[in-house]
Image (tube, rainbow, N blue to C red):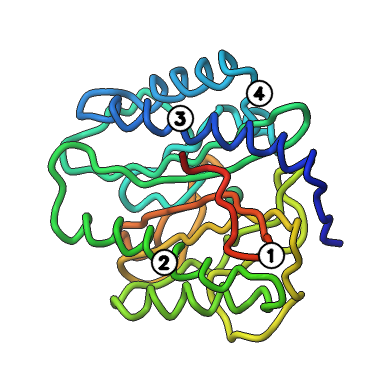
Amino acid sequence: MIYIKSKNEIDLMKVAGKVIANLFEVLEKEIKPGITTLELDKIAEEFIIKNGCKPAFKGLYGFPASICTSINEEVVHGIPSLRRLKEGDIISIDVGATYKGYNADAARTYPVGIISKEAQRLIEVTKNSFFAGIKYAKEGNRLSDISYAIQTYVEGFGYSVVREYVGHGIGIKMHEDPQIPNFGPPGKGPRLKRGMCLAIEPMVNAGHYAVRTLEDNWTVVTVDGSLSAHYENTIVITDGDPEILTIL
Ligand code: MG
């Protein structure tokens, strides 16, 4: 069941969303060769708590950290560790925050130092595919109109969208109905209504879309070893353009 949020509930989610947006500004400056992903996690956790929120991912389904850090061919759910970032890496950071019981969720992929043109293009296409998708996030449209727009945009650049992991409704729970694939035909799924809160999150592989999970039971990687990027925001359906809660 898709739960429609009241203005008051959305206001609480906005607080969590703004903390995440501000955190990305901090992390962007810290991401450079030599820093460990565990150091990034500590910065994020302290920032979230200092700003009155809780790190929503810590303990969620047993996840051990406050952010997911996924490097290069890692797609999502990478666990912060003593691994040091290297010049030329790309790193996807996924963050959730909870304010008074309400959640926001967002992800970005960042370059580490100077990266290849190909990696830069993957990051840009992934971000732009989110905005191509949310053009259709309007009251009265069908949910899969968003999915179709993202897939079409991404595949136009010769990349592929991950099938096994999808966007989601969000609110009191981090993952609520509906599931929001980044692929599939348009015109399917529920009609969008104002007050629906959705986390739209294209995960884009430079090569084939197939993924597998490593032995840590968390880290998802591309099967072909190609690079992967992630871009996510929490949005609210309104009577006009959607409101994005995790961008300043
Ligand atoms: Mg999400």
Q: Earlier in the sequence, mark 4 or mark 3?
A: 3
Q: Mark number for residue 22? A: 3
- Where's residue 27, x and y in %? 37, 29
* Residue at the spot 42% in from the left edge and 23% down from the top edge: 38
The residue depicted at 46 percent of the width and 18 percent of the height is 42
Callouts 4 and 2 close, C-beta under 8 Å: no
Q: Nearer the viewer, mark 4 or mark 3?
A: 3
Q: Quadrant of the N terminus?
A: bottom right
Q: Earlier in the sequence, mark 1 or mark 2?
A: 2
Point out the frontmost of discs 4 and 1. Answer: 1
Q: Quadrant of residue 209?
A: bottom left
User: Which numbered mark, 1 or 2, is in the foreground of this view?
Assistant: 1
| Residue at which label 2 appears | 129
The residue at 49%/41% (across/down) is 94
Answer left or right for 211 relative to 144.
left
Above or below for 125 versus 18? below
Distance of label 4 from label 3 (alpha carbons)? 15 Å
Confirm or deny contact between disc 4 and disc 1 (CB under 8 A).
no
On screen, 145 above or below 40?
below
Q: 16 and 230: which one is in front?
A: 16
Name the mark nearer the viewer: 3 or 1.
1
Label placed on residue 159: none
Q: CA distance from mark 4 to mark 1?
A: 31 Å
Read off the residue under disc 4.
Answer: 54
Q: Position of residue 179 (x, y in %)?
A: 69, 64
Q: As shown in the figure, which amino acid type bears the numbered disc 3?
A: Asn
Q: Residues within 10 Å of mark 3 (few under 14, many from 20)?
A: some
